[in-house]
Amino acid sequence: MKTLPAGQYIPGHSFLHQLDARTKILCLFLLIATVIGALSLWSYALVLAVIALLILVSRLPVRPAVAPVRGIYRFLLIVFLMNALFFGGEEVLASWGIFQLSREGIRQGFRVVGNVLLILILGNLLTMTTLPTQVTTALESLIKPLKFIGVPTEDVAIIISIAIQFIPTLVEETELIKMAQIARGARFESKKLLERAASFIPLVVPVFISAFRRADELALAMEARGYRNAKNRTRRKKEPLAPHDYCALAVCAFICLVQFLLLRNLV
Amino acid sequence: MLVEGKNISFSYDGFSLALRDVAIKIEKGEFLVILGANGAGKSTLVKHFNALLPLEQGELRVAQIDLRDEKDIWLLRRLCGMVFQNPDNQFVSSTVEEDIAFGLENYEAPRDEIPERVRAALALVEMGGYEKRAPDTLSGGQKQRVALAGVLALEPEIIIFDEATAMLDPSGRQEVLAIMDKLHKAGKTIIAITHYVEEAVAADKVILMQKGRILACGSPEAILTDLDLMKAAELLPPLPVRLYHDLRQAGVHLKNCPLTNEELVKEIWQLKSKT
Ligand SMILES: Nc1ncnc2c1ncn2[C@@H]1O[C@H](COP(=O)(O)OP(=O)(O)OP(=O)(O)O)[C@@H](O)[C@H]1O
Ligand SMILES: [Mg+2]
């Protein structure tokens, strides 16, 4: 079977699927705080238990749910090294010029990499159980309060919606331009990280130019359909949250509290 | 007259003219096709009709609204919808249903009327049942029909198709053309820009543009069969017309110049039965 790419929505009827997207986003924030706040082994044990439980409850296949781990190991390696080599610690194990390998540094490296992974998996669980439209609608209503500090929330909501809508087109286009350049002899498969990164530069320019052209055309199409500004538009209906949404929020808040008040300081 | 304009000139850059002293009249319910080579000014002209471009010079009235008056522009855009060439650059939402609602929301349609109007618009373009689909999962022809539904939801008088079939495969093109025809029969005014001269055959009126000017305006029979005119506009006449003239040169004289394959067959059949 073709492995599912990370993060793509998988239809289903699990408890996670049925939660309101707003709830899921807020819970995601609470759980991210729980991850970032983790210091002791006990607190990581709590996070891992929560994630395992979520995967179980979502009834998603485990493999795609933890797929982000595979995709970015190079990036994680760099993150690890940066932390390990630059974190000034007391117990220095070795040093080369400005680099310094310390026990604390290694621990810090593991912690950061672990946190990134856990957060990715949590985010992945959100997008795998929530339609992109549900995510955007939820974001739109969650950013509403920012209006009071002067953020043009209606415009931001439209921008989010269009940006998400444009992603598949741009991905497809990047693929096309890449093909066109491979046909003319470009190479993107170099084993060397630096060479590989450099080979993507000629890709960036045409993709950007095309994105701007598309944006121009889209703006025209929006105007033609009567778009004036984000304010004078029909308001979307506000769905109230269901009891199970409040339950989920309470549970996540509780986990977060347990983390910060109890486990964090255990050794 | 639904559209009436004269002395319209326009320049994008301030010195070269994209439109030169254009005069145009379009009647209600008319099916108008605009033909012309690349850069002839077709898009520039139609973008004046719904005020996507400002009227710099000349006079233009569309549906009783004077385009020199900026304040009614927004109302005009509801009356005069437009479908663009690239199906991928017209969507603002990640589901069909929300995308069609976009125009309705812009005109502050009552919230509880929106779902019904979205359904009705989708039914008009024969895309019922696709409400929840993501636009990027549709075929080109389906995308253009959804884009059209987004326009139709606003119940416009005039629908402009700016090369709306150009990026579609033959079956996608047929889908869109069939709906264009249906809308025309339902009494809508259709303005279609195209590079396919065959699409002009069914029109009530054809306008030939070249270098910012209107070169000719008349029935498809008058315009498409005129070799000199078509040549001046840098266009190739439909295949039956070219065959008619080639046959003539070879000494075979058909009675009338055919515009469609069916007419050509009929002419040849008549010639055969006479001899
Ligand atoms: N946004 C623009 N900025 C500057 N010049 C433009 C712009 N759009 C069109 N032009 C110029 O105006 C002229 C008329 O262009 P227009 O797009 O109206 O032609 P067209 O008949 O629609 O051609 P096509 O068949 O290629 O769509 C051309 O010379 C073109 O280069
Ligand atoms: Mg054009």
Image (cartoon, coloured by chain):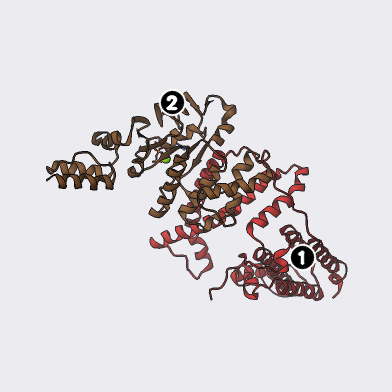
Chain colours: A red, B brown
Quadrant of the displayed image that contains ligand 2: top left
Q: Chain of mark 1?
A: A
Residue visible at 56% across and 73% down in the picture: A3
Q: Chain of mark 2?
A: B
Label 1 SS: helix
Residue visible at 48% across and 32% down in the picture: B48
Nearest the camera: B237 or B120? Answer: B120
How would you rate the neighbour count of disc 2 (Cα within 10 Å): few for under 14, some for 14-19, many for 20 or more?
many
Amino acid marked by disc 2: Ile
| Residue A89, percent from left and from top | 76, 70
Task: State the residue position of label 1.
Answer: A31
Callout 2 and callout 1 share a chain: no
| Residue A219, percent from left and from top | 55, 42
Label 2 SS: strand
Is residue B6 placed above or below B111 in the rendered structure?
A: above
**CA separation, marks 2 and 1?**
62 Å
Amino acid marked by disc 1: Leu
Position of residue A224 in the picture relative to residue A40 (left or right):
left
The residue mark sitting in front, 2 or 1, is 2
Task: State the residue position of label 2.
Answer: B8
Residue visible at 84% across and 70% down in the picture: A264
| Residue A104, percent from left and from top | 75, 72
Nearest the camera: B18 or B68? Answer: B68
Q: Which mark is residue B228?
A: none
| Residue A252, percent from left and from top | 80, 65
Residue, far front: B273
Nearest the camera: A197 or A184? Answer: A184
